[in-house]
Image (cartoon, helix red, strand yellow):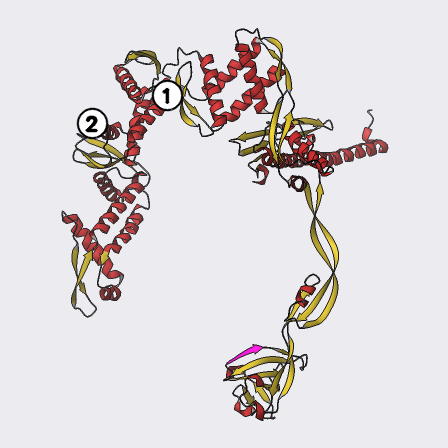
Amino acid sequence: MSKDVFANHRTNSIIIIVLIMLFISVIYLPKTIWDYEAKLRDESRFRMNAVSLAEKLHYQLAKEYTTDTDQLLLVVNSVKDSLLAAAMDSNYSYFGDQRIPLPPKTYSVNYSDEYKKLYNKLHLDLFKTLEPNHNTDAATINLVLDSIKTLFDGGNYVGDQSMVIDSIGLSFTVSEKFDILYQNIKTSMFNALTTSYTKYPSFSNPLVDAVMDSLAKNPNLTGRTKFIGIYDGDVRIDFIIPATFEETMEKTLETLKKQFILDSYDSVTYGDTLYDMALAEFLILNDTLDIMPDYMTLMYLDTGGVEIEIPVKIKVADMEGALSKRRNNLYKRLTGYSEPSPYIADQVIAVALDSMNSPNAGLDSIHLDIDLTNAIFNINVHNNISEYFNKVSLEQAYYKSAVNLSDLDWEKAAVEVVEFVGDRLIKKSDFLKWQVVEVESDTFNVNIYDAFLRKYDDMNIKLAEVLTGEFINIHDQAREIVATAEHLAGVDTLNWSGEQVMEFPADTLLIDVFPTYLSEYDTTFIIARDTVVQIEDSTFNGVWFRGKVGVTQEFSLDSLPFLSQLGNSNYRYDFNGTDSVLSINILEKSDTAYVEKVFYGMNKFILVFAGDSLLENLFLLAENYGELDSVQLDSISIVSDEFVAGDKEKNLFMQKDSFGGWVDTTFNKKYVKKQLFSHYQFDPMLTKCTVTDLPYRVTVRNNVNLGIESPITHPIETRRYLFFTQIDSTHGSLIDGEESWAK
């Protein structure tokens, strides 16, 4: 009989303990890994920010940023040290123009055949991303394309071909779909000329050819030009009737009503009914008359059965514009594009109206063949139409034919073009999109994209690593090392291959040290943190004004309309009988009494009353009383409304001439949030990634655009605690002060 292992209590206890430990580990260990990843990420971002701040100091000193973090450390810290030393010596000054010697640099390299192959391959790969093509003049380009099209239509003209034009031999590759590439030129031009679209060559080509032929005969032709008689048959138009087309029709009619002018009395009296009648009458007249009417007469039958003749004037010019806009809007709803011609739009809309009740309306595309023999096209011929045609010809067909690239020395051309473009981009950042590059191999059209310079720098960093055996994340240095090595290898008098030593001489950096540099350094490299502190504070209740005013009580209460006598000889205050009231404080009153200054006629009263409006006392201010000599005057003490002040403001208020005094003082404890700062030094550790220990990648474009990036280009996996993995991804970037992690 086999023994039951789980019958042993001790064994079960051990298993339970092990399982509990595993359970706790599964929960706790991943959290520690995640916390550590977050700590590395946050520290790395702090360091990138420190590099960005240091670059700003460097810019203030040298009027330029630097991609060399070693130079950044040297300049920023050596200036600080020199200023501190100067502060200890009254005979020494370190302000104004100064020179900082930069150390020489030496690199051991191995320029091998394998390196040269890699050099050529990487340049070739980058060259191909520029979509290179042989550059020639526009007339020759269009002649080549037209000639290829003629031969292509003849049949079997695909693959590698050649021809001679103006004694120039051209080789190219004809695509099996060259007719589509060629047609794309006409389609794009049709869209540019009409802001409409068609997939039918019978529609687009005659109009494009007519415009281009007219420009060839008259290069100065510009502005609105009518084209008629360029078609000799039908063309096809595709459209879909939207489900809401009928609703759109009604909405667009509303704008036409604005173009009617009626007598103001008629328009107010009969309202929308009259405008609806005017629109209905106008649509009938406009369809039957050759010209648009400028005047109509409506016959309106009023509620009394009397027929009234109402004249209506039409804003002809505005109505023409409104009708044109409505027609174009309806055509757009049907086809998705602007109308190429009113003649076409009217027919398409008419067919759509007839087909709205079709069960397929809103679902299936409708084909309409329209006879354009008498159609008129009003084309706006811009000054740059010819240039645009040449551009479209290049991009739609010529570039795809790889003219004169079949026999090209690709490696030689790649190095020449890539280095030319890289050098231009470093100096001129707007050297982008299609550009002409003239090098020894040929003259090329190349399409320079935004990320090219980044890829160019990446290429040089990779080449420098292979050449030196060490990773150099400073792309300016990498580019200089690669370029110098290639230059030395190309000098005929040198046998420069194998292991070599490259020496870059020492240089001097001119800087301008400004007087506040030390304080800026101290306020730049600080860590701010919020903390809550407890402080003793006092609260003071004060008044602005204390004083006495002359008053009298010699007047009749019954004569005042804001007082009403009650049965018990008391009076009740009613503010409705006053001209106005104003709150006021007097010292001689109970805590529950209310006081108001009452304005009535030319007199001012101070009235004291209880919460139920019962009168407690009433005084007439003597300052405006006419017969002061005959009145027995008294006085009362008044005080302004209270205000509250803190400990800091106490003395400030007491210095004011209008300050009356303190009424009450309370002491209490307050908790306030304060920001504390701790300083740190900009040291070499801050220029390196927390995970890879590689310098942050610093890029400078146009000497004003600064970028600091994490050197982590792909997730780095590290085994932790045997079963778990720590994954560190890129920590982001700081581009022109904008943090990627803040988005």
Seen at 27% across and 39% down, the residue is 339
Q: Comparing marks 1 and 2, which lies closer to the viewer? A: 2
* Image position, residue 209 (x, y; %): 23, 27
In the rendered image, the vertical position of residue 290 relative to residue 456, given as above or below? below
Judging by the rendered image, the residue that carries numbered circle 2 is 217
Magenta includes 580? yes
In the rendered image, the vertical position of residue 595 relative to residue 538, given as above or below? below
- Image quadrant in which you'd find residue 67: top right
Q: Which mark is residue 399?
A: 1
Q: Amino acid at mark 1?
A: Tyr
- Image quadrant in which you'd find residue 407: top left
- Image quadrant in which you'd find residue 280: bottom left
In the rendered image, the vertical position of residue 424 relative to residue 304, given as above or below? above
- Specify the segment rendered in magenta: 578-583
Count numbered badges in the picture: 2
State the predominant SS element of the stretch in magenta. Answer: strand
